[in-house]
Amino acid sequence: MEQKIDELMNHLSHSQQQMARILEAQRHAAVRMAQVVHGMPDDWSARSGVAGNEGKPGSRESDDAAEGFIQQIQQVNGSIAAYLNVMADFQQAAADHLEMVMKELRGGDSEE
């Protein structure tokens, strides 16, 4: 019985290491996207050099550029939200696996 528990623990450990590697890669991507968003200007009219309309709010080119920035920011926010959801799922899976192992260990202790 202990051998089965050990095999289960090894398998769970390996799968959680793989999930952690995936989440680490997603974290790096989310951090980089957040840095890009942070570097964007807070005031759209303060931008310069958009199709020759330097600082001219309300121009067609300026509005198109602002719309593009807004779409990119929404994509970044969606990616960050997806990362946080995956982290929550990972934590829940780890807790579920740990709960199963603890039940097995408690059951094994009472049998001895």
Image (tube, rainbow, N blue to C red):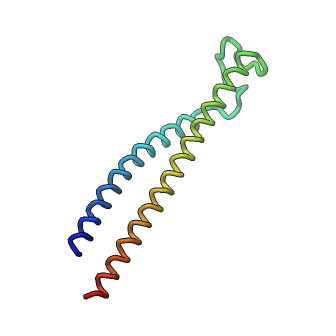
Position of 9 with respect to 76 (left or right) is: left
Q: Find residue 16 and report its image quarter.
A: bottom left
Residue positioned 28% across, 60% down in the render = 11
| Image spot of residue 5 (x, y percent) | 27, 71
x 69%, y 26%: residue? 67
13 displayed left or right of 3: right
Query: Which residue is at the far left?
Result: 3
Front position in the image: 46 or 98: 98
User: As displayed, is residue 77 above or below residue 92?
Assistant: above
Q: Position of residue 65 (x, y in %)?
A: 66, 22
Image location of residue 40, percent across then percent down: 61, 32
Quadrant showing the N terminus: bottom left
Residue at point 39%, 46% (across, down): 22
Please determine whether, in this image, residue 70 is positioned above or below residue 16.
Answer: above
Towards the viewer: 57 or 74:
74
Furthest residue in direction top, as rendered: 52
50 vs 73: above or below: above
Q: At 51% across and 47% down in the image, what residue appears? A: 83
Q: Is residue 1 left or right of residue 79?
A: left
Number of marks: 0
Of the 4 image quadrants, the one containing the C terminus is: bottom left
The foreground one among 35 and 84 is 84
- Displayed quadrant of residue 69: top right
Question: In x, y percent, where is residue 102?
Answer: 36, 75
